[in-house]
Amino acid sequence: MSNTLAGILIGTVLAVSIILFGFWGFLLVALFMAIGALVGRIADGKLDLRGLANAFSGKRTS
């Protein structure tokens, strides 16, 4: 799947969610999409949790 197609699908989901559920439903859907993206990147091995924790704790920069 290309980045353009992924962007179109994400935009479509968010547009439908704001129409059906209103502003707060839209924010909830966007939050769950972000959480799902993080879980997916962790599962693929593209996100290092230890490095992320060190960056947030100030032990090192990103």
Image (tube, helix red, strand yellow):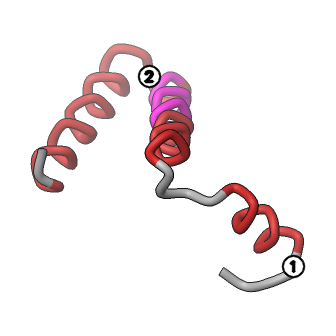
Q: Residue at x 79, y 84 (%)?
A: 60
Q: Is residue 27 magenta?
A: yes
Instruction: Tell me where residue 12 appears, x and y as whole percent.
Output: 20, 33
Q: Is residue 28 left or right of residue 16?
A: right
Residue placed under numbered mark 2 in the picture? 22
What residue occupies the far bottom of the structure in this picture? 61
Q: Is residue 6 left or right of residue 29?
A: left
Mark 2 or mark 1: which comes first in sequence? 2
Residue 22 occupies which quadrant of the picture? top left
Q: Which residues are magenta?
A: 25-33
Instruction: Tell me where residue 7 appears, x and y as whole percent.
Output: 21, 49
Residues 51 and 20: in front is: 51
Q: Amino acid at mark 2?
A: Gly
Residue placed under numbered mark 1 in the picture? 58
Q: Is residue 30 magenta?
A: yes
Q: Secondary structure at mark 1?
A: loop
Q: Secondary structure at mark 2?
A: helix
| Magenta residues, dominant SS class | helix
Q: Is residue 56 left or right of residue 4?
A: right
